[in-house]
Image (cartoon, rainbow, N blue to C red):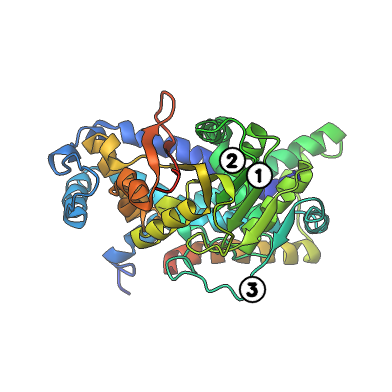
Amino acid sequence: MSANRLKPEDIDKLGDALIALTHELWVLRDRQKVLERLLADAGVLSPDAVQGFQPDDSLNAELSAEREALINNVLRALSA
Amino acid sequence: MTAYQLQQRGRASIDFLTDLRGCSNRLEADPAVAGINPGAIFDYPQPGTNLDFVSMQAKAVRQLSDSQAFRVLRLCREWMLAAHGRIAMDAFAEMPVALSSALDAAKSGGSTLQHAPDLILPAYWEGYEFHRSMGGWDGHDYMGFVHGELIHFHMVGRALAGVLHAQRMAAAAAALCDSPERILEMGCASGQFTAALAETYPDACITALDLSPRQLEQTQRRGNEQGASWSLLQAAAEQTGLQSAQYDLVCSYAVFHELPRAAAEQVMAEKFRLCKVGGVLLMADVKPYSSLSAHEVWSADFWNQVVGGDPYWREYAMTDFIAMAKSSGFVDVVWQGLGQSHYPYVLTGRKPAPH
């Protein structure tokens, strides 16, 4: 297997992908912070409940769709 | 403006863009960037001179590319240019469906919009994504709202709270007329300057035109929500089809730097034709290169002309608009920057009585 799957000319796209990932990471962290605050304020959950949670099929499907969109966003930057 | 709230993704994305811009801008002060002197390459260009900018830029960028700070700054700015339009559309897409209905409803009111579906669009404009904004001016059913609100207000305006409107108010007030009865604005886009004109001249009858129907719709919403009765029409500023000599003030804001020189000459001539005798020309726009230091010329040229999606910025910035306005027939022509920042640059003139 080649150790150089990306060529030098891909480096700008890699930079774009890095920023795109940082963007997505921030959106997610923002949402998580909002959720944690809302849940704590409502007395619904403790942080431990989130830590040990196992998703069911429905949530797994939702997570899968969002994960795919995230990956496509990164690939768009890489292949633009 | 129609009430709306950014949803989580849009809000967080615009926060991210704002901070990415702020953080990356600090790289400009890095000694490795600030210390490189493109002034050695860029002379002080005077309007009308013919300099080889392509070669000068290539040489400057070769020097600057040795700077890691410059490379990272460029990476960040080009990512923002490429991404901001999509982020704005995504922010719109996650808003409640009711917003679309509210935006549709806001088109009803005293401000009228005349579409021109058979209008032949200028080649320099059709399909081009100015500012590298995805979809251009019409690439979305609600592009006027997407551009005027989500891009202009939230993305651009976030770091310039109040400044953008203040600049437009200053430009409107710079017209050499106290109380124009009839005003024509050419290239109104989403109505930011139209609103400043209305605020400055509340008794004036305002007509505004643009090539983009989606942007005109946003101007119409803005007018209706202010209780105004603006006459809006889709038309090319080069050839409006309007009756001659019927406006006291013919103006534009940030339009000429989007035009190739031949089109700019046509628009200037059309402004003259549409002015009443004694009527006033007002053109507010970005700074000409003749007003900038060599380093500022390099910076403005690189970030706007070379990578910024403004293909006619350089032509504009190197054009002698005093000569162009005089050649079109205007007199008492003055071109100067406003306020301490000398921005925007405003060209004023007057249409004389015929000999």
Specify the farthest residue to the top: B340
| Cβ–Cβ under 8 Å for marks 2 and 1 | yes
Residue occupied by mark 3: B117
Separation of residues labelled 1 and 3 (CA atoms): 35 Å
Who's the residue at 79% across and 42% down the image? Answer: B227
Who's the residue at 66% across and 34% down the image? Answer: B199
> Mark 2 or 3, which is nearer the eye?
3
Tell which subunit mark 3 falls on: B
Separation of residues labelled 2 and 3 (CA atoms): 38 Å
Residue occupied by mark 1: B11
SS of the residue under disc 2: helix
B103 in relation to B173, above or below: below
Residue occupied by mark 2: B15
Specify the farthest residue to the front: B355
SS of the residue under disc 3: loop
Q: Amino acid at mark 3?
A: Pro
Q: Nearer the viewer, residue B13 or B228?
A: B228
x and y percentages locating residue B34 in the rendered image: 25, 33
Q: Quadrant of the N terminus of chain B?
A: top right
| Cβ–Cβ under 8 Å for marks 1 and 3 | no
